[in-house]
Image (cartoon, grey):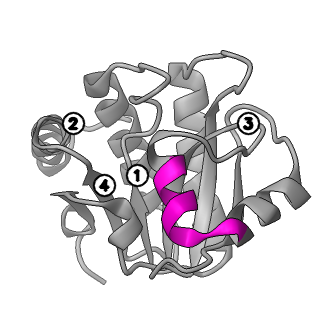
Amino acid sequence: MKPLTERILIQQGDITEMDVDAIVNAANNDLILGAGVAGAIYRKGGDTIQQECNEIGSIPLGYAAITGAGKLKTRYVIHAASMGLDGVRTTAKSLRMSTAHSLRIAAERKLQSIAFPAVGTGVSGFPLDECAQIMLSEAIEHLKGETSLESVYFVLFDARARDVFQSTWDKLRRELSTGAASA
């Protein structure tokens, strides 16, 4: 298996075009596919994803749920519920928990690759730099343990988000190489 520092990949692009085992949806806890990443997943993946979400129903903030991927290239969509449909915004705690839960679900399913967007930074308005720090730290902690995951992608919609994630990842990689990283 590749070293941890080669298993986290940052790129700019459209997460709905990723050919990985699972993509992560920046979800609300009612699992209603609305705007942003969720809307793109719904438009490209089709009605079956929302139908599966409806069967699951509401989940607690900070949790995640998995559905099929409809017409998308990926096999699964993992819905990371970092915000509430009722106006409850993403918090550091809900982002940390939903990221960790998404990674655990992927490992439980023996998936090898997963792609995350910058969860909570769209409609919910969570700060991009804090999002990058939390999500990358959770990925590092997960990959340090027993897991089937070989690759964790962070697929960012625009150059600014990609640059923030890349600079945060560069800093964390330096800390890892000196043994100073603590997530």
Query: Of the residues tagged 3 and 2, which is closer to the observer?
Result: 3
Q: Quadrant of residue 183?
A: top left
Which label number is shown at residue 139?
A: 1
Residue at x 38% of width, y 77% of height: 150
Residue to which mark 2 is pinned: 180
Which amino acid does the dot numbered 1 rest on? Ala
Judge left or right: residue 62 versus residue 6.
right
Query: Of the residues tagged 4 and 2, which is closer to the observer?
Result: 4
Answer few, some or many: residues within 10 Å of disc 1's Cα (few below 14, many 20 plus, some between 14 and 19): many
Which amino acid does the dot numbered 2 rest on? Ala
The Cα atoms of the two marked residues, 1 and 2, are separated by 16 Å
Query: Of the residues tagged 4 and 1, which is closer to the observer?
Result: 4
Q: Which of the two residues, 10 or 141, is positioned nearer the viewer here?
A: 10
Residue to which mark 4 is pinned: 154
Q: Which of the two residues, 74 or 131, is positioned nearer the viewer here?
A: 74
Labels 3 and 2 touching (C-beta < 8 A):
no
Reply yes or no: does residue 45 show up in magenta.
yes
Residue 182 % position (x, y): 34, 35
